[in-house]
Image (cartoon, coloured by chain):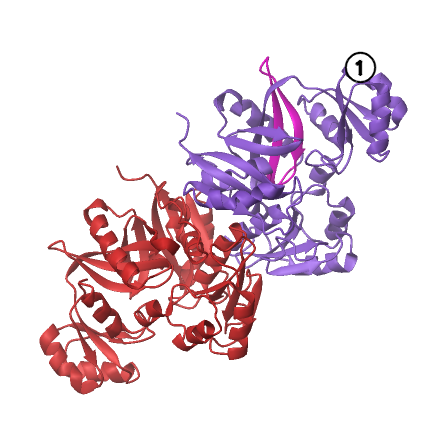
Chain colours: A purple, B red
Amino acid sequence: MPGFPLEPGATIGILGGGQLGRMLTVAATELGFDIAVLTPRENAPDARVAAYAITAAYTDEAALRELADLCDVVTFEFENVPADALEFLAGLGCPIAPGPKALASTQDRVAEKTFLNALGIETVAFAQVDGPDDIGPALERLGAPALLKTRREGYDGKGQRWISTAAEGAAAFAELGGKPAILEARAEFVREVSIIAARGHGEQLAFYPVGENRHADGILKTTVAPAPEWERVQDRAEAIAAAILEDLDYVGVLGVELFELADGRLLVNEIAPRVHNTGHWTQDGAVCDQFEQHIRAVAGWPLGATQPLVAIEMENLLGQEVETWPDIAADPYARLHLYGKGEARPGRKMGHVNRLRPLPD
Amino acid sequence: MPGFPLEPGATIGILGGGQLGRMLTVAATELGFDIAVLTPRENAPDARVAAYAITAAYTDEAALRELADLCDVVTFEFENVPADALEFLAGLGCPIAPGPKALASTQDRVAEKTFLNALGIETVAFAQVDGPDDIGPALERLGAPALLKTRREGYDGKGQRWISTAAEGAAAFAELGGKPAILEARAEFVREVSIIAARGHGEQLAFYPVGENRHADGILKTTVAPAPEWERVQDRAEAIAAAILEDLDYVGVLGVELFELADGRLLVNEIAPRVHNTGHWTQDGAVCDQFEQHIRAVAGWPLGATQPLVAIEMENLLGQEVETWPDIAADPYARLHLYGKGEARPGRKMGHVNRLRPLPD
């Protein structure tokens, strides 16, 4: 097992299968690394461009051994990989970044908010919902409407329902599979912003300018970065990200979604221990993009420059919106990124476009 | 066989095996294409990241059939692929870009200069050398010293010798294998510049700002782009490139190396029917880099913007210079690109670094 920094030619493993793994693979390729992807999906977007592809369940021990043998470090493209898989890899002596603590603090929405509040970071008020009987008292305390979410595994608006009454809550709880849940108070925010941050070996920190995000049906639709009036929130967003990164002894890129309230407060909505959709603008807007930044961090390299060169309006191409690619391709200042996915199911992230704009003064 | 523009998900073939193929693969991946590489080299830099890799001689007919079956268009990463291979692919009905005429006009140094001069484009004076007896009279006419080169297959200073006498010429001719050669007059140039140009379907043209190049031992060492005082030569460089692209009914990216003389004239030194080392700066300096531009062109897409966002000093990392990667990685404004090659033989292109600089006024 070589030490860090990893030398070019080393192999980095990704528990992957999607577009984030694909864009990490591209970034690693440019730095001279090989990528090995482990994914249960056949012909996955990242596996098609990785030097090594292992098609198996994340918990397949033979596959994990093969990955550990190939790789000098292993990372992951989303926070819902089984913690058992990382523990098994760690048990084989395989370095993992970010570490298991980051995963444990973000896989469960109650654990995440508890962790954040313990650091003195504000979130919306919330209540743990183990069964339908918990919902009435929680609604009483948090106010209606409130958002019922599964504690684990939801993303892109999946696994969540707005509820206003205990009866609605009981029905929603059943619809969501009767699994452990969380009820979140509604945030009266004026906008959603996010910060992409990174921490390297040796505690080096880097922060991109915050972006402003719009969601539709629970799915990110656009990010404008740097956000309008980004300086108003930048320092506080960085302080929040830094506290999280340092407490988790984190290595890699982290995404932090924030609600900006009318009174100026910032609440953390969600953290993602990985490259993040709201950071895709960095591919065409910043000196070193979030994907290369993550690869640099997990390889033990110094971090790259986060300076913006242009402003970007990032738009996700969801489902059949990808069919507008000819119009996007015809705009020389629209930078198109497509994920090589086959079927354009409704709401599926098929690609994104970064439209170049002049930097704000 | 689908028509053009190719849809995302289509497969583009590369007769490849090196770093240019690798960087083309990365660019195609971001646009949602799959790449199929045919190369005689095992574990080649591009084959490792391509969706499909065929390891066989370029002239292996079964391999070429396999490539044609996989691909919607085939391109190449260097001009020394056998013309027979392209003809065989064309005979199978496989679209090829740039076309065979581009290859025929650039594989042979005598044919290339003859082609350029016929277009009214100046080159250094030259003489065809079929045997050692041709050298004396040629030296007489061109003046000494002059540069003896093989007509075919030289690159990076390989296959060439400066000679001052007929006896030196005869020895050099033998050293170069006794192959058909060309003798080139010495150009009294004040600097070498190059222009990267592209032509798409529908005759669309695009030009990057010229770069200024320095070579050492016949190998490109640095490119500064945009070149100092680039406006002085830009219009004429574009006119030269446009004439070449149009005459060849070219589709793809073309590199044109130019000598700028003290009297202001521009002579074409060499043209390359492909992405070019002197265009690597575009990866970190221009809106759309030359690799994506080439993929767009051969896919029949509109061309991207060539506008520079920052100035770049590109430096090739030759042989053991690649071992300086930790210093480069520690500079946040140095953009490192490594090719995933194993052995750092002297003079071998192992990677390059693009250093960001403010744009000239």
Q: Nearer the viewer, residue A52 or A139?
A: A139
Residue B233 in the figure: left or right of residue A91: left
Query: Residue A333: x and y, percent?
Result: 42, 40
B306 up-or-down from B183: above or below: above
Residue B290 in the figure: left or right of residue A113: left
B193 up-or-down from A120: above or below: below
Crowd rating for badge 1 (residues with CA inside 10 Å; few <14, some 14–19, many 20+): few
Identify the residue under disc 1. A141
Question: Quarter of the image holding residue A80?
Answer: top right
Question: Quarter of the image holding residue B188?
Answer: bottom left
SS at badge 1: helix
Give yes or no for residue A257 being in the magenta stretch.
yes
Q: Residue at x 43, y 68 (%)?
A: B345
Q: Residue at x 67, y 44 (%)?
A: A345
Give yes or no for residue B74 being in the magenta stretch.
no
Q: Residue at x 57, y 64 (%)?
A: B52
Residue B86 seen by the camera = yes
Q: Callout 1, which amino acid?
A: Arg
Q: Nearer the viewer, residue B189 or B333?
A: B189
Q: Which range is magenta?
A: A249-276
Query: Residue A68: x and y, percent?
Result: 69, 57
Query: Looking at the rendering, in which quadrant would you find the C terminus of chain B?
Result: top left
Residue located farthest toward the right when viewing the structure as drawn: A133
Residue A204 seen by the camera = no
Q: Nearer the viewer, residue A54 or B68?
A: B68
Query: Residue A256: x and y, percent?
Result: 62, 31
